[in-house]
Image: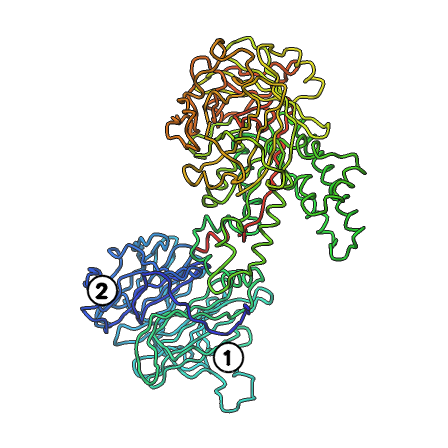
Amino acid sequence: MYKFKPFVFMEHAANGPERPKARSGHRIACDYRNLYSYGGFNPCISDTDPDMRDDQTWVASKPLFKELWRFNLVSERWKRLPGQENMPNELASNAVILSGNALMVYGGTGVPFGESCSNQLYVCNVNDGTMKIVPATGELPEPQYGQALVYHGSYLYTVGGTTGYEYTCDIHRFDLKNGIWETVYVCSGRDESEPHGRYRHELAFDGKMIYVLGGGTSTESFGFSKIPAFDLETNRWRILNTHGDSDETVATLPRVPAPRRCHGSVQYTDERTGTTSVVISGGYNGDWVFSDVWRLNLSTLQWTHLKECSLPCPVYFHSAALIPEGRMYIFGGIVKVNNKVQRTNAVYSAWLTIPKLSEICWQALNYYYPKLRDCSPDILLHIGPCGGKTTGQTRLCTFFENMGWKVFRVPETATVLLSGGIKFTDLNAEEGFKFQENLLRTMLQIENTFFQLGESCSRNCLIICDRGAMDASAFISKDKWELMMASNGWNNVELRDNRYNQIIHMVSAANGAEDFYSTEDHACRSEGVELARELDYKAAAAWVGHPYFDVIDNSQDFEAKICRMIECVCQKLGIDTGDRLRSSSRKVKFLVKAPLPADTEFPPFQDFDVVHNYLQSKSPKMQARLRKRGQKGHWSYIHTIRRPKMCGQVIEVKTQLTHRDYLNMLAQRDDSHFTIFKRRRCFLINNQYFQLDIYREPAHPRCRGLMLLETYTALSGNELKNILPQFLTIVKEVTNNPDYSMFNLSLREEWNSTNKYCHNMHGTMQLPDNQNINFSKNLKEIQSNGFDCKASQSNGLDCKVSGTLNSNLNTQQAICNKSINGIQNGLVNGKAFVERCSINGDDRKQEVCNGSPAMKLNESLRKLKIEPREKEFENRF
């Protein structure tokens, strides 16, 4: 079990092939996502070292490291940044400060130490490693190394340092605005408070005073009971007496840190109290190497020995840095282990403060799901319990808003109610049923509010419902659901089929993306995954039978999954997305051999009565038909017009009708076609949504006993065969075979004696009759505006395009057009009249519907694993 442990060091084992060599004399800095290490020294690397012998930069700079490394704090991967050619040769005991993405590097020495020192300021971009010298004028400090920096206002203060022979504690400052150096204070002995010259000391700063902590010369080290401090307001040095650790339980322990140099130091400010504290770690006094950690409160000058926060081993010439959340990192240095002194490239960290709960949760998340560190930032943004639904809605909303649409998002009603203190565990059976009933009533009323706003909206309008009315049926018994329906005058056709234009089910990660439900050494219990799969299936099954139901599975990565979802909506609206949402999904159709298996052989299904009537049309190149679809006497009605090529594409326009409009338009029935009667069976299996059309009498003899199975998929070959229902006898694939077009099947005349037969469907060759399930490679798909479009012959009849109404529609608004008696649909100036979107449950073709200005899209979606907020987790990598 994960436990947050402050003041306890942990080691960070580097992942990946890259990592820096052991070193000392380097400097590090941190932001909230990365640790950066600059320079360093190691004379013990062999010329035959396989990692270094071919590194020309190392060959030229050894034993100094002319390099900048970046260590990601989450992935724990090192990466050496480019830009070595612009780095100075003085690479040991520099002073560094990180501000934003700018790493300021000052001073330092080459080898031999002190022979070549620097007084130049460099700025390095930690994003790409580019490094530039900062032009400077004025009173430049003497070239030195081992100095320390403070950044305040527009000034960079440098304190102390050595030439290798002389040591100072002089103060200079550099104005970053105008590039001018100024001398602030030169220690000349005129004031007894002036500190001794030193190097490898550390600084603390509280906004007014610069505190000098430790440091020394080649022969001595300075202590901490009295510390020098420089007052920036008076420009004077002061000697401050500190207070020793107040813990007297162990009399033998020191009350203040022992004198030392080459130690690490970080500081932080308590947000609640405003108190600034500085923490020092490790160091060396010429005889001893230290592993202790001490904290100094700058307000009270009280030292506290952090006894439980001891370093894993004594170390000096290391470097320490603090992330904004309060975690101290230590990298490299010279360690003493079993009386053996050697350099290290280990990274350690310890929490010095109690961070926000969100940060602790982030740490726990990485503990339980270590694979997260290997995910790309984009994946991190989209995985999680709400990774499908929440992200999908956001992306869909942004996509349509960018095109000028008005998008409404109906919130999840259960969340609204449960946030008020309702707990299911507190409700008895009767109260639970009543709550579900009231929840559904509330949901419908909230949706109606948004639907009315959509109706009155002058712009194209998309309404996204977080949940839908049928979702509740997945989690209560069938008897209770039917009781609820009866007592409120509801029925499934109205709540499921007529209320929403499209249902999109995002399959749970527990079904096809199980890796997100398990981790190394921390696999989730199997019953958790199984339960997730069961709930996902129930949620999907609740919508089986909706005429426009799309299932988005996990056959591709998450980004592709989201794009498929957006594309699915765009295809039904006839919006050209160019190549932004590339799709390989297509409708496939199969001939099924009679007899129909027993109902018990099927998974849970919904049966519908479907009636099709073809209407008279003005042009032989245009089809028009009516569809009536229903259950138990409740019906929905659709009018479809399929137009020939326009702007290179075939257009299908659909309008949802009232019963009255349907009866009026039925008078225009085309007598050259039979009325088609079907029983449509809808079911979900293998994460695939299928529709089985069973043709019924009265019909042309060619339709007797005919059964056609349809689905939408991007699979082909054996993968496609494997998802087909095994309990059905599939004769062959008949996708694009004109003999199985409903238009041709409904013709009264024999095919060999009529001029209305559409010989060539979608510009593809007819498939031979004698082949079994054949996933033909002869289907010629033409790319048009980023969609898979099927070429049509000149008659333009029954020709499908999965494309757009207008090649420029992705940058323009669709225009609303009221139909006249439900008949007038069409294009004006090449622009689509789009108000309402639905998905054709018959042929699953491209469609745009006039009528209501609101499109109501319900997503019955499942959860993945985490939903990091946008940008927050991305920026950690």
Q: Quadrant of residue 316?
A: bottom left
Residues packed near mark 1 inside 10 Å, few (<14), some (14 to 19) or many (20 plus): few
* Alpha carbon separation for disc pair 2 and 1: 38 Å
Question: What kind of residue is marked 2?
Answer: Met
Neighbours of disc 2 within 10 Å: few (<14), some (14-19), many (20+): some
Q: Give how far across and how far down residue 381 sits, in percent.
A: 50, 49
Residue at x 76% of width, y 40% of height: 482
Q: Label 1, secondary structure: give it.
A: helix
Q: Any mark on residue 52, and which?
A: 2
Q: Pick whichever of labels 2 and 1 is earlier in the sequence.
A: 2
Name the residue carrying label 1: 308
Quadrant of the drawing holding the C terminus: bottom left
- Asked whether, in this view, residue 716 is left or right of residue 725, the answer is left
**Residue at the image point whose x is 78% and y is 55% from the top:** 427
- Residue 770, horizontal then vertical, whole percent: 42, 27
Q: Looking at numbered disc 1 in the image, what kind of residue is underneath it?
A: Glu
Q: Secondary structure at mark 2?
A: loop
